[in-house]
Image: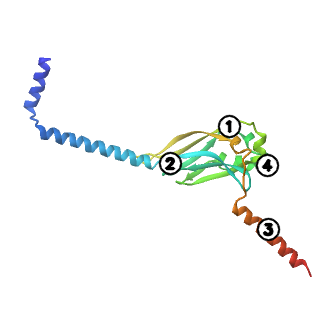
Amino acid sequence: MEKFVSAIAAAFDIFPVDGSDIAGFVAALAAVAGSIVSLKLYLESKKPDVVAYLECDPDKMAISLVVRNFGNGIAKDVRVQNLSPSLVKPEFRDVAMNGFVSKGVPMLIPGGSRRTIVCDTGYAKTLDDEAVESVSVSYKRKTAFGRWKTEEAGDFDLDFYSFLNAVRAESDIHQMKKSIESIAKSLKAISRTP
């Protein structure tokens, strides 16, 4: 131990260090650490955050698969995997399974989304009462060095059962549509009378 202490003392004799030098060194380290943390926070704030979920249109009672970028960065080559064709109503199956679900989305901007109708609530009732299927989503994001890196967004549960047996009210838009159709029908009847 004595030799170690004398070696340190000898080093300070060769390189004289006082309190201001140590304070300057610590300040420089703090500035570098602060820059690294700031850069990391900036890069994290520019990451995409892509999720998949089901959404119900209350007017049409249609259930759509939605893939949305909730993040602040661009997601490229967005892929949806493991969507079971049996979850998609047969008359929607060709369109839904051959759209972005199979081909992917070339680019999804922040706040952007893609959706496709997979079924209506009537078909969802024919599925298992506790039917929860998962889909996987992957995408590419830009790294700090400008390269594109593949990210696995994860598995997302598609819970059809939560849309069943829900009380709904027609929206104002739906009621306006019915009123306009009624007016059009009345005008057609008036125009036919001699």
**Mark closer to the chain start, 2 or 4:** 2
**Mark closer to the chain start, 4 or 3:** 4
Q: Secondary structure at mark 4?
A: helix
**Mark closer to the chain start, 2 or 3:** 2
**Residue type highlighted by circle 1:** Val
Please provide percent x and percent y for residue 98.
Answer: 70, 48
The label shown at residue 145 is: none
Identify the image quadrant of residue 21.
top left
Vertical comparison of 184 with 168: above or below:
below
The label shown at residue 91 is: 4
**Mark closer to the chain start, 1 or 3:** 1
Q: CA distance from mark 2 to mark 1?
A: 26 Å
Please provide percent x and percent y for residue 17.
Answer: 11, 36
Residue at 70% of width from left, 59% of height from top?
A: 171
**Residue type highlighted by circle 4:** Glu
| Residue where numbered disc 1 is placed | 132
Residue at 13% of width from left, 41% of height from top?
A: 20
Q: CA distance from mark 1 to mark 4?
A: 21 Å
Residue at 9% of width from left, 26% of height from top?
A: 10
Q: CA distance from mark 2 to mark 4?
A: 33 Å
| Residue where numbered disc 3 is placed | 181
Please provide percent x and percent y for residue 115.
Answer: 65, 52
- Nearer the camera: disc 2 or disc 3: 3
Q: Secondary structure at mark 2?
A: loop
27 displayed left or right of 97: left
Mark 1 crowdedness (10 Å alpha carbons): few <14, some 14-19, many ≥20:
some
Q: CA distance from mark 1 to mark 3?
A: 38 Å
Q: Secondary structure at mark 1?
A: strand
